Amino acid sequence: MLKEEKINALAQMFRSEAYEFEIENFIKANAKDDDDAKDITEKAKEIVLQEKLKHLPKRNLMIFSAWTIGVIISFYLFYSIIPYQDVIGYTTLLSIIGALVVCFFILHAYAYYGTWTVDFLKVLDKPNIQYSFAIIFLIPCFILAFLFSEKFDYAENELLQSSKIQTIGTVISGNSTEYKRVLHGGTGMKTNKVNVKFVTKEGKEFIITKEIDGYNYSRKFYKGLEVDVIYSKNNPKNMQLINLESLPELPVDFDNIYPH
């Protein structure tokens, strides 16, 4: 077998991703000495590399660009479009989904970054993405989820203020939930919620649950209390309690101080 034929045959083995032991056996069987083996190997690799450089840089750059565009589009959707679609009740879920989607695109864009260079293509055709490596994206995901959540809250308030209608609501029930500290014991966070019933201008009745700070809950709220309410005419579920500071304090011995 001529040397050129050996080089082409070895290049074909590299193309077909033959097993390493098969390549080593071929070189041992066809090389005259170590220098000849090195020369055959380098020339075969150079042939394969030049073939790769005809199309792989463009392909990998296009794939990287596609993932990067995915990052931009998904971020834009979850930050600038979806929050303004009146998605009351789903904001936490959508914030988490948005963060995961954006991080998924970021992971792949990061993996494909630089895969169009000669140094990379000498070793691999494309990145070998290890999804266990995605754990390093947990912190960016948490940050994105928080950012999206804040944006959903801001958009919710914007939508409410742009189409608000004021009416009177009635407290029909409430509850206070205390979360114990896991590590050190004792009292942890406490949340207070009241259920408020109101009727829209169209005569439709809604009961909405709102979170109340501890002072207002314990000193001002009780079952049957009438409160000022604003709601969005486009989506009455988007509602806020207003003028809470003007509510009178209840006497300490008031029988129905908690709106159970």
Image (cartoon, rainbow, N blue to C red):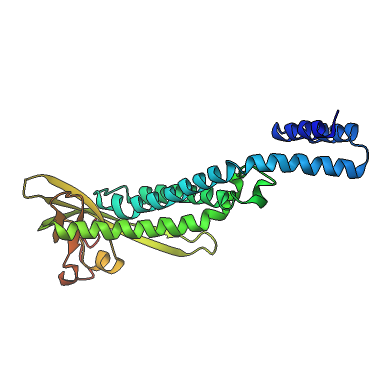
Say left or right for 98 vs 251.
right
Between 15 and 186, which is closer to the camera in this rendering?
15
Image spot of residue 152 (x, y percent) = 31, 56
Quarter of the picture containing the C terminus is: bottom left
Say left or right for 88 vs 246.
right
Quarter of the picture containing the N terminus is: top right
Relative to 231, does residue 184 appear above or below in the rendering? below
Image spot of residue 250 (x, y percent) = 19, 69
Can residue 226 be seen here? The reply is: no
Say left or right for 155 vs 116.
left
Can residue 26 be seen here? The reply is: yes
Image spot of residue 41 (x, y percent) = 81, 41
**Residue 50 placement: quadrant:** top right
Relative to 1, does residue 36 appear above or below in the rendering? below
The structure residue drawn at horizontal position 40% and vertical position 59%, both measured from the top left corner, is: 146
Between 136 and 175, which is closer to the camera in this rendering?
136
Between 5 and 215, which is closer to the camera in this rendering?
5
The structure residue drawn at horizontal position 69% and vertical position 47%, both measured from the top left corner, is: 122
Relative to 9, does residue 224 appear above or below in the rendering? below
The structure residue drawn at horizontal position 22% and vertical position 60%, both measured from the top left corner, is: 158
**Residue 130 placement: quadrant:** top right
